[in-house]
Each structure stands twice: as C-alpha cells, then as structure tokens.
Amino acid sequence: MIIVMGTVRVPVENIAAIRPMMAKVIAATLKEDGCIQYAYGQDVLDPELIHIAEKWRDIPADEARRAVALGLRDELRDLFDELGGLHLQIGKYYPYREIMNNEALGELVAGVKAVVDPERLMNPGALGL
C-alpha cells in the first residue's frame, strides 16, 4: 500500500475558485486502477490550509488513464500558483527546475542533490532534478 499526504496553502478568498478543479482531479484519480482514496480537506483551525490524502493499492498500470489524472493535477497546480497558493506536497508535480530562470542556481541545486543523493534514490525526478 502507498500513502501520500500533502498540503497546499491558498488564500481563503480563493478557495471557492479551486474547488471545481479539485473535484475534477478527485474524480479522475479515483478512476485509476489501484486508487483506494484521493481527497482534499480544508483544515478546521487554519482555513487557508488544504490537506491532500492519497491511498493506493499499487502504482496504476493504465498509462492513458493515469495521464489524464496527472494532466488535471498539473492544471490544478497551475491554478494554485495563479491564485496565490503555496503547494507543500512532495515536489513530484512541481516544475521547479523548468521554471527556474537562473542557470547557475539550477546547477547549484542539482549539485547539492548529487552530493546528498548520489544514487538518486530519494524522489527520483521530483522537482525536475
């Protein structure tokens, strides 16, 4: 079983604007083979904090269906960015390296990753590293 937990912080005045896209992501992800649970929940004590919970039997084998869900997640990530959201989930879906416009900084970050994780076992491919 695979469990993924994450959070995203969105200004409370923009929560209503992200709900329709979150519903699309949930619906598409729940159709994936192996998905047991996929949910978003607004924190009771901190209304700007959205919790993300995923539970998987295993990694989905249907690549076409997975591509649809991942595409919707990318759209939701972009919407979070547009509305001032700060995504704190594992960096798997955040295009950190792709949007970095400072080559020297990119090389520094990649160098640190190479020193800390020379075999690339921790979150391979996350953040574009």
Image: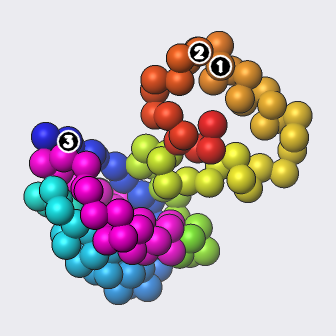
Is 100 on the left-hand or right-hand side of 52? right
Which residue has dot 2 on it?
Answer: 118
Q: CA distance from mark 1 to mark 2?
A: 5 Å
Which residue has dot 1 on it?
Answer: 114
Which segment is the magenta one?
48-77
Q: Earlier in the sequence, mark 2 or mark 3?
A: 3
Residue 55 within the segment the image draws in magenta: yes
**What amino acid type is highlighted by mark number 1?**
Ala
Which mark, by number, is residue 32?
none
Q: CA distance from mark 2 to mark 3?
A: 25 Å
Q: Is residue 6 above or below residue 8?
A: above
In terms of secondary structure, where does tag 1 sit? helix
**What amino acid type is highlighted by mark number 2?**
Pro
How far from the left and from the top, in percent, is residue 79? 53, 75
Asked if the residues shown at circle 2 and circle 3 are in contact, with their CB atoms under 8 angstroms apart, the answer is no
Q: Which residue is located at x 50 percent, y 45 percent?
A: 91
